Amino acid sequence: MELEKRNTLILSIAQGLSVTTTNINMINTGLVGTILATHSSYATIPLSLQFLTIALTLIPVSLLMGKFGRRAMFLIGAMSAFVGCLVIVCAIYYKLFSLFILGSILLCFSQANQQFYRYAAADNVSISIKSKAISLVLAGGLIAAILGPEVSRYSFDFFPDYIYYASN
């Protein structure tokens, strides 16, 4: 029972952190796109490609989880988020729209992985507390719904020459 609680807590924290990243990303992507794009009509291309990336990778991520296990795919997803955020930071620093698109796609591969945290919680607990475990993991996303916009609000202009640099 103790292991079930620990795993549920870890998955809840992971859900909260990953959804915080998602929220900040959704808030800032169009705004950064406006700054970096050569034409304002291109500003939402990265955001559109993010949704497309999630849609195209959900099923492969699920199949890969079946083959290699959830833990391996969660680690790959976390690394994808880390690398994606680094690429986005570089894109903002060097003012490269194409690099920003690449970073956005990498970040959204991570978001496809995050969709499976609740299923991992359900798989790792007894039937009697399954619904509670799923609820606790999803509650991590509720905390992120508050935390993400606040982090974005207070960090977007930490570096005045590179707006949104600190948010990523």
Image (cartoon, grey):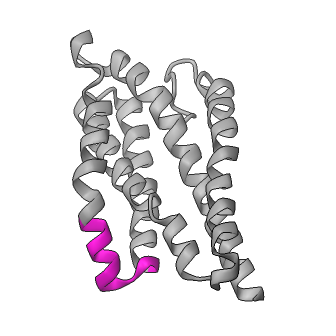
The image quadrant that residue 10 belongs to is bottom right
Q: Nearer the viewer, residue 119 or 7?
A: 119
**In the image, farthest residue toward the top:** 40
Residue 168 appears in the picture as rendered: no
Q: Nearer the viewer, residue 164 or 115?
A: 115
**In the image, farthest residue toward the right:** 2
Q: At x 60% / y 21%, what residue is drawn?
A: 157
From the viewer's perspective, is residue 55 above or below residue 1? Answer: above
Q: For residue 70: magenta? A: yes
Classify residue 119 as left or right of residue 11: left
Question: Which residue range is magenta in the image?
Answer: 60-71
Q: At x 68% / y 53%, what residue is drawn?
A: 139
Q: For residue 13: magenta? A: no
Residue 114 appears in the picture as rendered: yes
Q: At x 69% / y 26%, what residue is drawn?
A: 154
The image quadrant that residue 45 belongs to is top left
Secondary structure character of the magenta stretch overall: helix
The image quadrant that residue 153 belongs to is top right
Residue 103 x %, y %: 33, 44
Residue 84 x %, y %: 38, 49
Residue 25 x %, y %: 47, 36
Q: At x 32% / y 51%, what residue is drawn?
A: 106
**In the image, farthest residue toward the front:** 128
From the viewer's perspective, is residue 109 above or below residue 90? Answer: below
From the viewer's perspective, is residue 143 above or below residue 95? Answer: below
Classify residue 31 as left or right of residue 38: right
From the viewer's perspective, is residue 102 above or below residue 30? Answer: below
Q: Could you tell me which quadrant the N terminus lies in?
A: bottom right
